[in-house]
């Protein structure tokens, strides 16, 4: 690792570039957490996560943190649309389109880089159903199955399935 960084500095200087040590962060990517994270490089900070192009990158290689963050952002957007969900003059079909275009797109930003586990798929499905129930104003105490809600909305493909077909 130290040798790679040394070569990077040399090649950069040959091209007239100087690496800013105070701004440069190093992340050791290790799925199992077995690599040594001692800062043998001295002046560079070693980090476990950082934001790159609006997405959180983790040294464990998973996407749990980013998925949770995106769900939070999408839920916030969903909550800001409460006036629309309460308006009885707006058709259900229009509300579905609003959820799909505004809320789900906020959630799916950067999703092509995610590595999904089964627990992530379940979390995505739970988020999707939270959105549909919120849109229909169905309280969590109501005894409605997910299937009946999806059938009522005529949703033929779950968000996690669309996601899997598009990117995995």
Image (cartoon, helix red, strand yellow):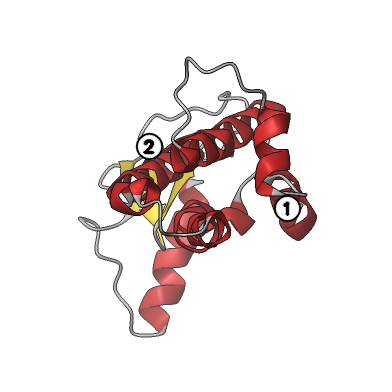
Q: In this orientation, does residue 62 appear?
A: no
Question: In the rendered view, does 98 fall on the left or right side of 156?
Answer: left
Say which residue label 1 marks: 162
Mark 1 crowd level (few <14, some 14–19, many ≥20, 10 Å Cα):
few
Disc 1 secondary structure class = helix
Q: Residue at x 52, y 62 (%)?
A: 94
Instruction: Residue under label 2, please give it.
Output: 40
Q: Residue shown at 40%/51% (left/top)?
A: 88
**Residue 96: percent from left, percent from top:** 55, 55
Relative placement, left or right, of 81 versus 156 is: left
Where is residue 76 drawn, in percent x and y? 32, 44
Mark sitting on residue 135: none
Q: Residue at x 41, y 58 (%)?
A: 89
Find residue 5 and report its horizontal and vertical position in percent.
45, 56
- All told, the count of numbered labels is 2
Question: Rounded to the nearest whole Å, what is the CA distance between mark 2 and mark 1?
Answer: 44 Å
Rendered residue at 58%/54% (across/down): 111
Question: Which badge, 2 or 1, comes first in the chain's sequence?
Answer: 2
Dots 2, 1 in contact, CB < 8 A: no
Residue 37 image point, x, y percent:
43, 30
5 and 117: which is toward the camera: 117
Q: Secondary structure at mark 2?
A: loop
Q: Select label 2 or label 1 by which is in front.
A: 1
Could you tell whether 82 is left or right of 157 in the image?
Answer: left
* Classed neighbour count for the residue bearing mark 2: other residues with Cα under 10 Å, few (<14), some (14–19), many (≥20): few
The part of the image, by quadrant, that contains residue 123 is top right
């Amino acid at each position: 690792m130290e040798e790679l960084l040394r070569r990077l500095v040399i090649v950069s200087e040959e091209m007239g570039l100087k690496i800013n040590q105070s701004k440069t962060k190093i992340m050791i990517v290790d799925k199992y957490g077995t690599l040594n994270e001692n800062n043998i490089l001295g002046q560079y900070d070693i980090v476990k996560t950082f934001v790159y192009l609006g997405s959180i990158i983790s040294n464990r290689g998973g996407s749990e943190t980013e998925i949770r963050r995106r769900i939070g952002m999408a839920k916030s957007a969903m909550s800001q649309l409460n006036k629309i969900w309460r308006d009885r003059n707006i058709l259900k079909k229009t509300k579905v389109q609003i959820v799909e275009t505004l809320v789900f797109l906020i959630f799916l930003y950067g999703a092509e880089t995610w590595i999904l586990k089964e627990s992530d798929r379940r979390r995505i499905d739970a988020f999707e159903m939270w959105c549909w129930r919120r849109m229909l104003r169905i309280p969590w105490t109501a005894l409605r199955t997910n299937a009946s809600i999806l059938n009522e909305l005529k949703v033929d493909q779950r968000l996690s399935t669309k996601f899997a077909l598009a990117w995995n």
